[in-house]
Image (cartoon, rainbow, N blue to C red):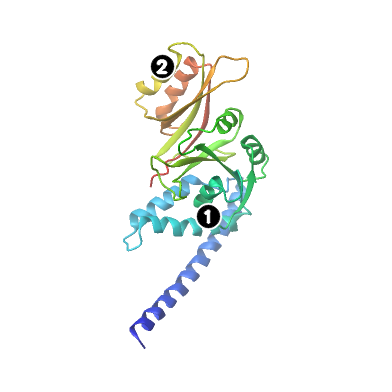
Amino acid sequence: MSELSDIRVQIDAIDTQLLRLLNERAKLALEVGRIKSRDGLPIYAPDREMSLLRGLVERNEGPLTPTAIRAIYREIMSAALALEKDVVIACFGAEGGACHQAAKARFGSSVSYAFFPDVAELFAAVGRGEGDCGVVPIEEAGHGAPHQTLDALASTDLKICAEITSTPDGTPGETENSSRYFVMARTATAITGRDRTTLLLRVENKPGSLVDALEPFRDAELNLTHFASRPASKGSEDVFFFVEVDGHARAEAFEGVLRELSRRCRAVKVLGSFPKTAL
């Protein structure tokens, strides 16, 4: 037997072991799905997902790169998720579009996708249970925050549960030229310790009102990471400010901040807390 043939025999044996282990993992995923269904738990748990990926990357000794590890396990988790339930991910735009590609980078190829030309329509479908999660653009490379998404966030009861970043060529990652997407769900995400929160502040449109509204973040030493604004509604001069801040809305550090924001703003809405994408 040649050296190459001997190596291939070893690879075949390892593949047989991997297949057996993957099927054992799949059986456990079926049990997880049964428990989630019984207890009314959300099918998608981004906090568990990010914890698993971070742990794998930290334990990885190579030669596989962290990027390769994440890509492999994205598909393993996608297959497991599809076993737990017939998962449907609602995407803004058309099949094959930027949002669809970003969603596939997060949810893999084993789940099903549905497409919506309107963000509000997508939110309504997920709210009715016609999709398990929805993926919408929140920051398009070179264009900023899409107004359609901001307007829909102001009125939806869905929660941001995760974020996705991708570069123009579709590669996941955080760069200056990346686009960002929010994953929307019907339930909030648990604290991971490495979280970000998006808030909606309704502020009176007068000099100094925004500075006054943002002071509680400075006083609590909470780092603001993103910022956008939209007119509150027709017939009103109020302004909606969309603020992203490091930390989880249910963390102790946020309690006093939210109380103070409620005192200073016309309205305050927690749009969701989610794990940071950087692993």
- 126 or 247, nearer to the observer: 126
Question: Which residue is at the far top?
Answer: 207
Residue drawn at (41%, 47%) of the image: 173
How many numbered markers are drawn? 2
Give x and y (percent) for residue 43: 57, 48
**Residues under labels 2 and 1: Cα distance?**
42 Å
- The residue carrying pointer 2 sits among few (fewer than 14), some (14 to 19) or many (20 or more) residues within 10 Å by Cα, namely few
Q: Please name the residue that numbered disc 1 is placed on.
A: 108
Q: Quadrant of residue 147?
A: top right
Determine whether the residue tagged by mark 2 lies in a helix, strand or loop. Answer: helix
Instruction: Give x and y (percent) for residue 199.
Output: 49, 28
Amino acid type for the residue under numbered disc 2: Val
Identify whether 232 is placed above or below 141. above
**Label 1: few (<14), some (14–19) or many (≥20) C-alpha neighbours in 10 Å:** many
Image x and y of residue 259, in percent: 47, 20
User: Which residue is under mark 2?
Assistant: 211
Callout 1 amino acid: Gly
Secondary structure at numbered mark 1: loop
Q: At x 47% / y 45%, what residue is drawn? A: 47
Circles 2 and 1: CB atoms closer than 8 Å: no
